[in-house]
Amino acid sequence: PIPCVPWQSQTSGQYQRRVHGYLLLYGELPTPQQLEDHQYHITYHTLVHEKLIEFFKGFKSDAHPMAIMCSVVGALSSFYHDSIDITLA
């Protein structure tokens, strides 16, 4: 089991999932400020653009999931082009 930090006053499952996610990404338990920053970044970067939802609707209902995934991952670069650093390629 993952240890609880002393300052933890909340016991909700949602809080625990945020702490576990942070622990998996960074290998350590977060401070309250780190957890707040992490929650902001997760919320900001997990919003789905409405056009991407329309992109999903363009596939046939019996399309293979791997084909859908490959197409959507490729399309993501057009939605988040400002996050791409082409000098790293």
Image: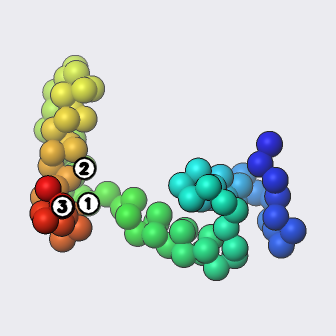
Residue 52 seen in the current view: yes
Residue type (three-letter) at the residue carrying disc 3: Leu
Q: Residue at x 62, y 55 (%)?
A: 27
Residue count near mark 2 (Cα–Cα under 10 Å), binned few <14, some 14–19, many ≥20? few
Residue type (three-letter) at the residue carrying disc 2: Ile
Q: Are marks 1 and 2 in contact (CB under 8 Å)?
A: yes
Q: Residue pushed farthest front?
A: 88
Q: Mark 3 sits on what residue?
A: 88
Q: Mark 1 sits on what residue?
A: 49
Q: Position of residue 10 (x, y in %)?
A: 80, 65
Residue 57 seen in the current view: no
Q: Mark 2 sits on what residue?
A: 53
Assign a secondary structure to mark 3. helix
How far is mark 1 from mark 3, CA to CA?
25 Å
Assign a secondary structure to mark 1. loop
Q: Nearer the viewer, mark 3 or mark 2?
A: 3
Closest to the observer, 46 or 6: 6
